[in-house]
Amino acid sequence: MRVIFMGTPEFSVPALDALVAAGHEVVAVYCQPPRPAGRGRKSRPGPVQARAEALGLAVRHPASLKAADEQAAFAAFKADVAVVVAYGLILPQPVLDAPRLGSLNIHASLLPRWRGAAPIQRAIMAGDTETGVCIMAMEAGLDTGPVLLREAVAIGPDETAGGLHDRLSGLGARLIVEALARLPCLVPEPQAQAGITHAAKIDKAEARIDWARPAEEVDRQIRALSPFPGAWFEAAGVRVKVLASRLGQGQGAPGEVLDAAPTVACGSGAVRLLRLQRAGRAAQDAPDFLRGMTLAPGTRLG
């Protein structure tokens, strides 16, 4: 098929590779414009743009698709289908309708649960035991379209957003190739009206750990925000991110370090910190981290 691919971050790259490997003609790749990054604040292309250019594909990165000339340029590709995965811009109806067979979205949840921007993080934060990927026929609403294919996966008890991200990215790549191969035979299934939840974008204000919460919630917060933006606490005025954890044993005042592991008391229960990172330094497993920064039993973390 003639495919327009629309995506921006690393999550989208496996799907682009899978479409090319399957023999589809990717006539254009749309992604968000390069943004300043690093200490020099130089503009850098996103992962999809970098991969598309390496594959020799035509890349477009308009700041918006609302203008009539941009919509005309999109339609001029005469695509059979558009494949959208974590693109990051709203698609106006003329764009959705331009491809002959419509526009398909790879969404990292079991719709209608976790519509929106952060389905992976919200699923872990909520304590869900499973999630998955849906291939959805796109409508103007936010992730409201009918589902063509879905596949569920279990969320491991120690799984971070980073690990789940990689698994779902690969699953989405496989499912979109299957969906295009079976597209004439697939029957769109309208989403149920029961069970709708919304995965709001992660706000950095959510990242500070409140040790007064139950240990189960603190553990899920840590895993849901790893590797980015990273749940954090303060010790002796130093901000420390926690990138991996598991439930621990012990009781104490919220934020109290209970042992040398370190295990930290919460409002109820305790959490063992497995991987930590100080600002400007590499992440380290707890034993290595504690050689450079002491978190002695009895210390209160803020």
Image (tube, helix red, strand yellow):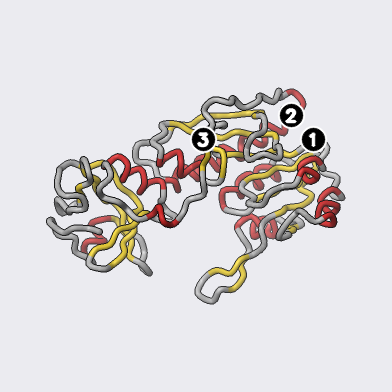
User: Regarding mark 3 in the picture, which secondary structure is present there?
Assistant: loop
Which residue is disc 3 drawn over?
Answer: 197
Judge from the rendering whether residue 216 lies leftward or rightward of residue 161; answer left or right.
left
Distance between the Cα atoms at labels 1 and 3? 28 Å
Contact between labelled residues 2 and 1, with CB atoms less than 8 Å apart: yes
Q: Residue at x 73, y 59 (%)?
A: 62
Contact between labelled residues 3 and 1, with CB atoms less than 8 Å apart: no
Q: Residue furthest left?
A: 298
Please tell me the numbered disc located at residue 101.
Answer: 1
Image quarter for residue 174? top right
For the C terminus, the image quarter is bottom left
Residue type of the residue flagged with mark 3: Thr
Judge from the rendering whether residue 113 lies leftward or rightward of residue 84; answer left or right.
left
Which residue is disc 2 drawn over?
Answer: 183
Image quarter for residue 240? bottom left
Q: Residue furthest bottom?
A: 40
Q: Is tag 1's residue or tag 2's residue first in the polypeptide sequence?
A: 1
Residue 139: x %, y % from top left? 71, 37
Instruction: Determine crowd level at label 3: few under 14, some 14-19, many 20+ residues with C-alpha closer than 10 A.
Output: some
Distance between the Cα atoms at labels 1 and 2? 9 Å
For the N terminus, the image quarter is top right
Residue 260 drawn above or below residue 184:
below
Residue type of the residue flagged with mark 2: Leu
Query: Nearer the observer, disc 2 or disc 3?
Result: 3
